[in-house]
Structure formats: C-alpha cells, structure tokens
Amino acid sequence: MIEVRRLGAQVGAEIHGVDVKTLDDAGFAVMYRAWLDANVLVVPGQELEIADFLRYSRRFGVVHPHPSKSTRHPEYPEITLLGVNKFGPDGALDQAIYRRGAEGWHTDGAYDEEPFKATQLYALAVPSTGGDTFFASMYAAYDALPARLRERLDGRLGAFTYGGRRKATALLNAEDREWTPVFHPVIRVHPETGRKGLFFDPGKIIRLEGLEPAESDDLIDELTGYMIQPDAQYRHRWRKGDIVIWDNRCSYHKAAGDYPPEEDRIHWRVSIKEHPAAPGRPAPGQEAAAAGR
Ligand SMILES: O=C(O)CCC(=O)C(=O)O
Ligand SMILES: [Fe+2]
C-alpha cells in the first residue's frame, strides 16, 4: 500500500511502501499527484542502478543533459554527478563542486527557454553531518506579495542567464560561458495546478524588462525578500537511498553546502523537462556560438 505523509505544512511529502523499480501506473499517479500538491517528493530506501534511476525519472518527463559538461557522468550524459571530483589534482577543494547550489535560493534552469520542470536526486553517499537541502514554495512567495507589487509585476518579463549578474559560470566549459538571455514572466501560472507563483531567481535574473537599471535592481532586491516564507519551507536531511524530486515551476531550493569536505556526499542528478529538445536547436548557452558570435 502506498502511503503519502506530509512533511511540511505547504512543502514536502514522503512516500512509503514503494519500490520505484516495480511501481505500476496507478501507484505512479498517486505519487505524481502528491508531488504536484507538495512541490517536493521524497521516496526513501531505494536501491537503484543508473538505468533504474533514468527509467523512473522519465516517468516525470524528458531527461535532458545539464549544460555543465564537466560534471556529467562520463557514460550517461543525462546524469549529473554531485560531489564527485571535489578535490583538484593539487588537492585543493573545488568550491564550485563542493558548494554547488549553496550560493543562494534558486530554481533550476531559469536560464533556459524551457526551464526544467523538475530536478531529481538520488543519494549514493551522505555525510555524517550537514549537507541538507532546503526547499520553499513559489506559491507562498506570490501569495505574500502586496497588491502594489503584484500590479507592478503583472505581465512583466525577467531576463535570465546561466550565471546571472555575478556571471557565476565556474561549472561551465570556457566555450559555453557566453549566454544569450532568455525571458520568462516573473508571475508564472503553473501549467498543471493553475496556481500562480513568483518565478524568480536572484542568481540568474539579470534585469526586469521595461525598468531603468537601478529600478530593476531595487525591485530584484525587494522580490528576493519575499521568496522565503517561514511557514512554506521544508528542510531535507539526506539518507542513503533517498530519491527527492522537486518542481522548479513552483519551488525554490538551496543546498546547505556545509558538510565536512573530507566526507563523501554524492548524488546522481537529472534535469527533467516537459519537452524533448527541438530538432536543430542549439543546446542552451550555445546560441551565441551557433550564430557565429
Ligand atoms: O545538492 C543539493 O542539495 C542541491 C543542489 C542543487 O541546487 C541542484 O542540484 O540543483
Ligand atoms: Fe539547484
């Protein structure tokens, strides 16, 4: 029997009583519904090979390789490795790998024309302490906006790039760092739940369209203050064998980035979209190169 337990009041649900390797369609439908309701779904105690993880991930959508080529699994480009090759040849800790996802609250893939629908992680090794992942609701952020801000944002587009205003592109190969901005409405209606959320990422947004630069920066700061609502968070403490999937269309997340660096914290990670890559379209970040620039 599949059991769904709520973790936080608004964010997070945990599933018990499933082995995702043998899950039937009716069982998956229960889990998918729970995921839409809770934005973040935890499935503990799974024993998976890479093929199992990919097969299960594809039930949520289309798995796309991440633009960070250096952190792809050498044999399975759709799998990103988290926490692997943390130490360089000189023995120094690579902060971009160790602190990946820890620089601030964000949503994955806002730099892409079709941002990731979901990101899914499978824990292979967990540290003895630290290394949690934090989640928060975009719906709650939107609900908290005063009417004055909702009116200013209604129909407004944000321009996003991979590294944002700080140009944080350390995980990209040098030839992939020139990023063509993409545009998304900052008030976004979730395509499946119909609920409005504040689709926002201070580390990837470069400006709000139609505003003077100073006004845009001020509004970005103001919106950053609404992202995290105290009653709409969930903190995940990892156990080996956990699968966690989050919905990038309605949630923010952040890695704690605080575990003992000498310990292993290793995940397989996939980026999931609604759609396959359009034929002949350059990969994200490659538009400038493809246009000969
Ligand atoms: O490692 C984590 O806890 C999450 C990192 C992250 O932000 C991501 O994988 O998108
Ligand atoms: Fe992330």
Image (cartoon, rainbow, N blue to C red):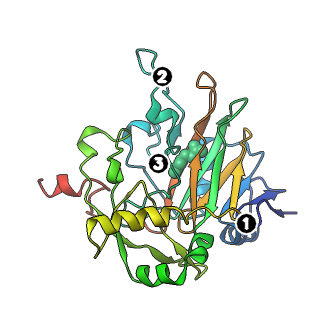
Q: Which mark is residue 87?
A: 2
- Residue under the image location 68 percent in, 35 percent down: 130
- Quick one: 107 or 231, which is closer to the camera? 231
Which kind of residue does numbered mark 2 sit on? Phe
The relative height of residue 158 versus residue 103 in the rendered view (above or below) is below
The relative height of residue 158 versus residue 75 in the rendered view (above or below) is below
Q: CA distance from mark 3 to mark 1?
A: 23 Å
Pinpoint residue 9: horizontal percent, then vertical percent: 77, 66
Which kind of residue does numbered mark 1 sit on? Met
Q: Which mark is residue 144?
A: none
In the image, taking residue 4 as reference, residue 275 lies left or right, namely left
Pinpoint residue 125: horizontal percent, then vertical percent: 66, 33
What residue is disc 1 on?
31
Pointer 2 residue Cβ closer than 8 Å to ligand 1: no
Q: Residues within 10 Å of mark 3 (few under 14, many from 20)?
A: many
In the image, taking residue 191 as reference, residue 134 lies left or right, namely right
In the image, taking residue 216 as reference, residue 87 lies left or right, namely right
Q: Does dot 3 land on a helix, a strand or a loop?
A: loop
What residue is disc 3 on?
78
- Mark 2 and mark 3 lie on one chain; the one further toward the N terminus is 3
Regarding residue 20, the answer to whether it shows in the image is: no
Which kind of residue does numbered mark 3 sit on? Glu
